[in-house]
Image (cartoon, grey):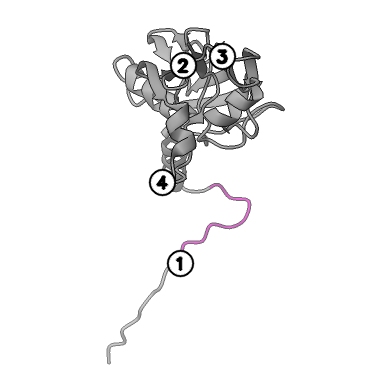
Amino acid sequence: MKTAMTIVVSLLILPGLAATPLAQTATTAARQTADARPPAPAPVGTSGTNAPASTDYRLVAGDKLRIEVYKDAQLSQALQIRPDGKVTLPLVGDVMAAGRTSVELRDAITESLKEYIGNPVVTVIVTETAPQVVYLVGEVNKPGAVPLANGRISIIQALALAGGFTVFANKKDIRVQRKTASGMQILHFNYKDALEDESRREPLTLLPGDTVIVK
């Protein structure tokens, strides 16, 4: 009579013994893959005692930035936006920053770097903001800078803070100069029409750095 015998062999890695070469290879490969991946872009935000809390803040001349390019210390820069609204980076050159959010500036720099770097990872951080003001010039009683409350002010409120108009002011064609990413924008505002507007539409809202010209 024949007896069938089944032999079960178990391989155990006992505590204190090294893993098999196959296990070591798999572990090493996994670590190398993880290290090779660039980190996800850091949240585009702000820091510093004088920085805005919201990422929809639009940059103005005088703002201080920290631009980080992953694994490239030469391209990573601490910069201040110049009076012309631009910043300068190696390889990229001049980039318009004023009028953009930090997200928009990050995207613009990333797109420009693609010509030189494969899959660049860029982070833009606002470290310090310039005083948020608008400027009123021309035929107003108190020309000069007017601070923005909570970053926003209507043109009617700004004109009131400037002491109103002189007797020579043209109230029908007040101009607002605004720097944007695409260049200088000129807005027109009719003060008389705004006062007579029965629809109660919200008057023109000024942005930091705007210049109101009353002729």
| Real-space Cα separation, disc 4 to disc 3, in angstroms | 89 Å
Q: Residue at x 35, y 81 (%)?
A: 5
Task: Specify whether residue 17 is painted magenta.
Answer: yes
- Mark 1 or mark 4, whichever is nearer to me: 4
For disc 3, the marked residue is 167
* Residue 161 visible somewhere in the drawing: yes
For disc 2, the marked residue is 170
* Amino acid type, residue under disc 2 in the picture: Asn
For disc 1, the marked residue is 10
| Real-space Cα separation, disc 1 to disc 2, in angstroms | 96 Å
Q: Position of residue 56 (x, y in %)?
A: 50, 35
Q: Residue at x 40, y 73 (%)?
A: 8
**Magenta segment range?**
11-18
Q: Position of residue 93 (x, y in %)?
A: 39, 7
User: Looking at the rendered structure, which numbered label has been put on residue 207?
Assistant: none
Which circle's residue, 2 or 4, is located before the other in the chain?
A: 4
Please tell me which residue lies in front, 190 or 117.
190
| In the displayed structure image, the side of residue 32 where residue 153 appears, left or right | right
For disc 4, the marked residue is 22
Please tell me which residue lies in front, 26 or 50.
50
Local SS, label 4: helix
| Real-space Cα separation, disc 2 to disc 4, in angstroms | 84 Å
Which circle's residue, 4 or 3, is located before the other in the chain?
A: 4
